Image (cartoon, rainbow, N blue to C red):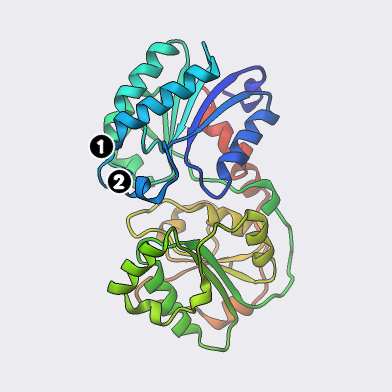
Amino acid sequence: MNTTDLKGKKVLFIAPKFFGYEIQIVQAMQKLGATVYFHSDKPSENVWVKILLRLFPKLVWPWANRIYITWLDKQRLTECDLVFIVKGEAISPKFLRILKLRYPTSKFIFYMWDSIANVKYTVEKLVFFDSISSFDSLDCRAYPQIRYRPLFFINHYQQRVENEERCGLFFFGTLNGDRPKVLARIVRVLGAGVPFDYGLFVRSKWELLLRKWVDDSFDVLEKERLIFQPIPATVIKQRMSVCNCVLDIEHPKQTGLTMRTFEVLASGKKLITTNSAIRNEPFFDPSLICVIDRKEPIIPPDFISGLTPPIHESFFVKNSLNGWLYEILKKD
């Protein structure tokens, strides 16, 4: 399906609420002419609901089913052209069967921007979809029905700054996995000689207390760098703009490239990443992308302070939000 084919289409879109990316996707589909009906892939954004979903999703499913069905009834959406689900953490097989009965002529499209190992019972849901894509290349190899498609950057990150020398390193991400440990190691490696603007989004104070109890890397990190409210994408972009390099730390259980990967490169910045899978991408350039070991990071000083080489125009076409939508929604 060419994205221009969205004109006049009705799209039922279910996805995580994640730093406003879901809004950007909705707006992009609307600009292409679609009428979009959006709901979060969770029945509640409460942190305890999210924890329960991650550990025991079957306990949440009956409640989530009722919420989704009530919402659908209120929308009075008697028919739609596309059922588009991203991740679908609280979407149960039972609810997918209900959707199939309600919308028998719709095309069902599924995209994973997490690894299957991180979202229980995902495999059992795949049978309901006509088209399945993922950002995780290992999942695509393990399941032949899944097509590999990396993530995207939002348009406002596309800022061409060629050969403008800047200094310093920037990082902002959610507290998960081993990120505190990796950050602490990088703080030690850089020392005071390189400005390092970083921040960790903490979902709750209880989570922070539990993590501090078992992880002494927080002793190295500055307290003011722990943030309890999501930072808007516009603020992140502004903070990135004064740095030459941006750090990306993927979840240790993921091989897929994060959204930040594409945002950094689209912004005309250098990327320092712990994700070695980026070496397999067509846009990989060691003068633009530095791959580090998460346990023993080594960052060449001249990489941070040096000029940023330009990236090929094809990168912007393929990895834009519209480029992502084109591949996800296209006809097989």
* Dot 1 and dot 2 residues touching (CB under 8 Å): yes
Up-down relation of residue 243 to residue 300 (above or below): above
Indicate the quadrant containing the N terminus: top left, top right, bottom left or bottom right. Answer: top right
- Residue 109 is left or right of residue 157, and the answer is left
User: What residue type is disc 2 on?
Assistant: Leu
Foreground pick, 227 / 239: 227
User: What residue type is disc 1 on?
Assistant: Leu
Q: Secondary structure at mark 1?
A: helix
The residue lying at 38 percent from left, 58 percent from top is 251
Residue at the spot of label 1? 59
Neighbor class of circle 1 (other Cα within 10 Å; few <14, some 14-19, many 20+) is few
Give coordinates of residue 254: x percent, y percent.
36, 53
- Residue 248 is left or right of residue 308, and the answer is left
The residue lying at 69 percent from left, 75 percent from top is 166
Give coordinates of residue 241: x percent, y percent.
69, 66
Residue at the spot of label 2? 52
One can see residue 139 in this view = yes
- Residue 244 is left or right of residue 38, and the answer is right
Give coordinates of residue 27: x percent, y percent.
65, 35
Up-down relation of residue 219 to residue 142 (above or below): below
Would you identify the image quadrant in which residue 274 lies? bottom left
Would you identify the image quadrant in which residue 252 lies? bottom left
Give coordinates of residue 56: x percent, y percent.
25, 43
The residue lying at 50 percent from left, 84 percent from top is 190
Foreground pick, 63 / 322: 63
